[in-house]
Image: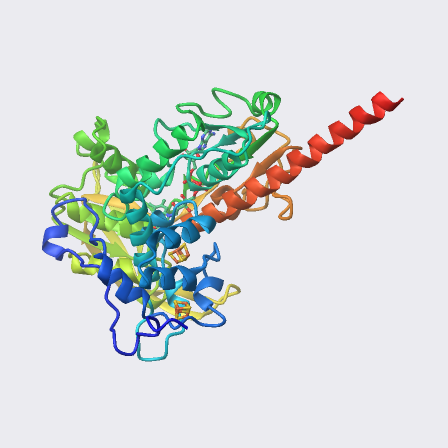
Amino acid sequence: MSERMLKFVATPQAMPDKRPAAERRRDFDEIYANYAREKAAEQAARCSQCGVPFCQIHCPLHNNIPDWLKLTAEGRLEEAYELSAATNNFPEICGRICPQDRLCEGNCVIEKGFESVTIGSVEKFITDTAWNQGWVQPIKPRRERTESVGIVGAGPAGLAAAEQLRRKGYQVTVYDRYDRVGGLLIYGIPNFKLEKDIVQRRETLLRDSKVKFELNCEVGRDVTMDELRRCHAAVLIAIGVYKARDIAAPGVGVPGIAAALDYLTASNRNGLGDEVADFDSGALNAKGKNVVVIGGGDTAMDCVRTAVRQGAKSVKCLYRRDRANMPGSQREVKHAEEEGVEFVWLAAPQAFLGKDKVSHVRSVRIHLGMPDSTGRQAPQEIPNSHANIPADLVLKALGFDPEDLPTLLKAPDLGVTGWGTLKIDWKSMMTNLDGVFAAGDIVRGASLVVWAVRDGRDAAERIHSYLTAKAAMTQGAAVALAAE
Ligand code: FAD
Ligand code: SF4
Ligand code: SF4
């Protein structure tokens, strides 16, 4: 093994420099700086090059982590980039926003007492360097194919599939109902986690690789599935899940209560320079307000931290379980606390007070009871434990479900699961409609970017197998006819 590695004993874990909370609160810029070259090499050298790398096993893309850490430690960054890009279409994005504490880094097996290798930050460093050095170049397929593939949805699943198919020489068109490319990368996830130019340079790369985009084009409204199936040899549906779960509590319809994604989209659009009526009117702007966010996932964390940056008077996060049982990343909670967010654990909303506008959230304390059928402790209300929390803006961040897909897509025969997600055959990734595949959140339910990338890559492989088999059959039939 290289002498450079196994340095975890002498070198402590060091993340890239994090900006002070007081400074972060004032802008929407990313909170971490990039590693300096020597620092990245030093941190990569902490890896002990495990024979069975649990980090790699627990990365949904099975990235070859130990090898690109070794190459980084040796200063061979171009090779590290090639290796990292071979399994991940957006390493610099995953390096920024994967919940590493639950995936690769959370499974790093460096001896107890030493912190894990900072895998995500090194991954981000490698690909940011590759962009700066001009190593990331548009795709030039070895041969062009005549078959075209239509992809519905320009989020990470659709974009990863588009890139993989283009590499194989297919003619690819991506349709999206939004006016910009990126899905939740552009309109959901805030700038302080993922700056928008990082997403936009990926769009430019795909356009330069001759992937076509049809934006402001909603499938089911502007074009039908039948039309797409007629003009493409295969279609991939990667439209994500967008129906916000609601709260059944008195007063929930009173003005001043909004869905988390509407709020985040308005903030992102404002940051991108769009005119946003609900932001300018103050309806979806936290400035000067007492904000209460309900939920404990990534979306809730993004809302509280956005509200802080918009200049809210106070920001509270109400979650019915405790810190250890929240779905959001612990790293995000820590950032939020540093930035001044108050977490009200074990509390749930019971009613929303206020006549013309919300004024308070009536909350009740929660006790975690016996585990339910899912194995999680069931939340139980504690009698007579009410409190009225002042609120001028309430954001509901309780998760997402799929819409009624056969209706939305005007494809009445499209098969769905009991959860409303698209039903696929997991081996072929095809829906019940011949030549129509699906990937990402629309199949898994609300999940992670890294899983969307994995699904997009897998779907591209399956589409390729389907189209090659189809071409072989057509060729076989033509030969048989000629022989008759
Ligand atoms: P999406 O990203 O949702 O993209 C779907 C695209 O399809 C959209 O562009 C949409 O406009 C388009 N579309 C929908 N319907 C149609 C139609 N009928 N016709 C044409 N186009 C259509 N994951 C992480 O890993 N880390 C995080 O930090 C993180 N933070 C998040 C924060 C928020 C606020 C949210 C909501 C999610 C977050 N996630 C995070 C989850 C992650 O963003 C998603 O899992 C991922 O984006 C799913 O990718 P996708 O391509 O399946 O769908
Ligand atoms: Fe870790 Fe995500 Fe990178 Fe995989 S893609 S190595 S899980 S940060
Ligand atoms: Fe290196 Fe940790 Fe992965 Fe082992 S688990 S190969 S030490 S990063």
At 31% from the left edge and 35% from the top edge, which residue is drawn?
A: 200
Q: Is residue 280 left or right of residue 454?
A: left
At 51% from the left edge and 25% from the top edge, which residue is drawn?
A: 220
Looking at this view, is 42 or 58 the one in front? 42
Q: Is residue 208 above or below residue 439?
A: above
For the rendered model, the colour scheme is rainbow
Q: Is residue 455 among what the camera can see?
A: yes
Q: Is residue 255 among what the camera can see?
A: no
Q: Is residue 462 left or right of residue 77?
A: right
In the figure, residue 252 lies in which quadrant? top left
Residue 108, image x and y in percent? Answer: 39, 69
Furthest residue in direction right, as rendered: 484
Q: Is residue 322 left or right of residue 35?
A: right
Looking at this view, is 404 or 462 the one in front? 462
Residue 242, image x and y in percent? Answer: 42, 39
Q: Is residue 201 left or right of residue 227?
A: left
Residue 158, image x and y in percent? Answer: 47, 37
Q: Quadrant of ligand 3?
A: bottom left
Residue 26, image x and y in percent? Answer: 11, 47
Q: Quadrant of the C terminus?
A: top right
Q: Is residue 345 above or below residue 95?
A: below
At 31% from the left edge and 80% from the top edge, which residue is drawn?
A: 113
Figure disc tally: 0
Q: Quadrant of the N terminus?
A: bottom left
